[in-house]
Structures are given as structure tokens and as C-alpha cells.
Amino acid sequence: MNSIMAMAMGDLAKQDETNKLVRLRDHLIDHGINAELRDGNSALLVHTPEPGLPVMVFVGYGGLYYSWQNANKRHRADDPKGAAMALADHIKSR
């Protein structure tokens, strides 16, 4: 694979991760949780309902999982609705 193709593939992977984070953000909004894309659309900053530190969510493991809390918590990226529910439970239990 030449360098131009490799760069294009990297751009496609980054766009896929961004799309997954946007879908998660939209489902979090349905749960009344505010979240915003950060760090060049590579992370989702999820605000907690109570005062405290926000949670950073990334798409990792080759695009297969959403992960947060230093990757100690994760959920399949092909299930943004379920991930939003798991993340909402995590935030509310803190």
C-alpha cells in the first residue's frame, strides 16, 4: 500500500470513530446527559449531572469499543444506545 492510500485509510478510520462518538452523544442527549466532541473529534467529553470531573470517552480496540475510565469500562461500539445506558449508569453511580 502506498503512502497516499495509507493516509486515506487512516482518514476513513478517524471519520468512522467520529461518527460512532456522534451517535453515542445523540443517545446520551436522550438520557438528559450533555456531551461534546473534543480533541479534534477523537474523544467525547461527557458532563456529569452533579458537580465533578467529566468523563472522557474514546473509540478504541480497533474501533470495536467505546471506552472510558482509563479503558476499565467499555461497551461495544456497534451498540451506541446500550453504551449510552451503561455510561449514564456509570455517571449516576459516581
Image (spheres, rainbow, N blue to C red):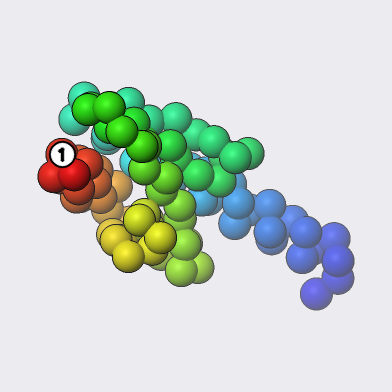
Location of the N terminus (image quadrant): bottom right
Look at 60% across and 40% down and name the residue there: 39
Q: Amino acid at mark 1?
A: Lys
Instruction: Residue 76 in the image: state x and y as whole percent.
Output: 30, 61
In the displayed structure, does residue 9 sit left or right of residue 30?
Answer: right
Report how many numbered discs are placed on residues in the image. 1
Which residue does the numbered mark 1 point to in the structure image?
A: 92
Examine the rendered structure and indicate whether residue 10 appears above or below residue 51.
below
Q: Nearer the viewer, residue 85 or 19?
A: 85
Residue 76 seen by the camera: no
In this picture, is 42 found above or below 48?
Answer: below
Residue found 44% across the figure and 30% down from its top: 36
- The reply, left or right, for residue 26 in relation to residue 63 is left
User: Residue 17: x and y, percent?
Assistant: 51, 51
Residue at the location (29% across, 61% down)?
73
Image height of 29 relative to 60, above or below? above
Identify the residue at image location x=45%, y=55%: 59
The image shows residue 33 at horizontal and vertical percentages of: 26, 28
Q: Nearer the viewer, residue 22 or 34?
A: 34
Q: Residues within 10 Å of mark 1 (few under 14, many from 20)?
A: few
